[in-house]
Image: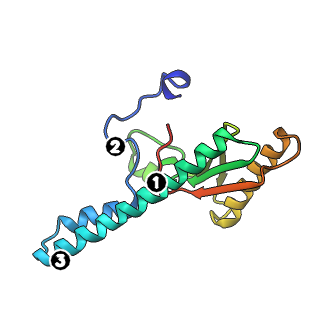
Amino acid sequence: MWRKEFSDVKLRKHQKLSKRTECTLFKEALLTKLTKEQKEELLMKRKAHFALQLLARQKYYKHRAKARSSPQHYSSLIIDNMNQAKITLPRYSLNSKTDSAYAGVHHHVTGALCHGFGLDFGFTWTDRFHPDSNVTLNCLLKVLHHVKEINNNALPPVFYSCEGIGIQED
C-alpha cells in the first residue's frame, strides 16, 4: 500500500514499528548485571512471554482464516491504538526552543481490520475525548454498523475480536 498510494513518503529502513513494552523490558533487563540464576529465570520468563504471544497470534490467524473463508458465519476484527507520540502536530524536522515550548495538538488514531469483508478503518480524535474504552467501543460500533449495512442488514452469528496483540498485518 505504501509504495502504491504514498510513493512520495519515505519510510525508515530500520525498525519501522516500535517494540512492545514487555519485549523492551526483557531486553533491557538482560543487559544489566545478573547472576547466572537471575539470567536463567529471566530467560525462562521471556520464553514464556514469547510462547503466549505465539498462541495469541495463532488463535488470531485461525479466526481470521475462518472469517475470510466463511464471512456469512464468522467475523473477525482486530482493533488497536497508535502510539500518540508519533502523531503530535505540528511536527518539524528541526525544533527551536520556541517550538519545543509549544504544546502540539495531540491526535489519537485507532485502526480496525474486519476480516471476511475486507474492511479497514481509521478513526482519529483529539484530546477533547479521553482515549479510553468508550472510544474503542465507539469504533467497534461503527465497524459493526458498516458490516451490517453491507451484509443485507445482518451480522454474522459468530464474532471474534482481538485487541492489539502485536501483530503486523501484511
- The mark nearer the N terminus, 1 or 2, is 2
Residue 19 % position (x, y): 37, 54
Frontmost of labels 3 and 2 is 3
Q: Residues within 10 Å of mark 2 (few under 14, many from 20)?
A: few
Whether residue 34 is visible to the viewer of this picture, yes or no, is: yes
User: What is the three-letter code of the residue carrying label 1?
Assistant: Gly
Q: CA distance from mark 1 to mark 2?
A: 14 Å
Q: Nearer the viewer, residue 110 or 149?
A: 149
Q: Nearer the viewer, residue 51 or 148?
A: 51
User: What is the three-letter code of the residue carrying label 2?
Assistant: Gln
| Residue pointed to by mark 3 | 38
Q: Nearer the viewer, residue 100 or 127?
A: 127
Q: CA distance from mark 3 to mark 1?
A: 27 Å
- The mark nearer the N terminus, 3 or 2, is 2
Q: Residue at x 59, y 46 (%)?
A: 64
Residue 109 % position (x, y): 60, 50
Q: CA distance from mark 3 to mark 2?
A: 29 Å
| Residue pointed to by mark 1 | 166
Dot 3: what SS? helix
Q: Residue at x 88, y 45 (%)?
A: 153
User: What is the three-letter code of the residue carrying label 3?
Assistant: Gln
Whether residue 121 is visible to the viewer of this picture, yes or no, is: no
Q: Residue furthest right?
A: 153
Q: Is residue 77 left or right of residue 23?
A: right
Q: Residues within 10 Å of mark 1 (few under 14, many from 20)?
A: some
Residue 26 % position (x, y): 28, 65
Residue 94 % position (x, y): 38, 41
| Residue pointed to by mark 2 | 15
Q: Is residue 22 left or right of residue 164?
A: left
Q: Is residue 33 above or below residue 115?
A: below
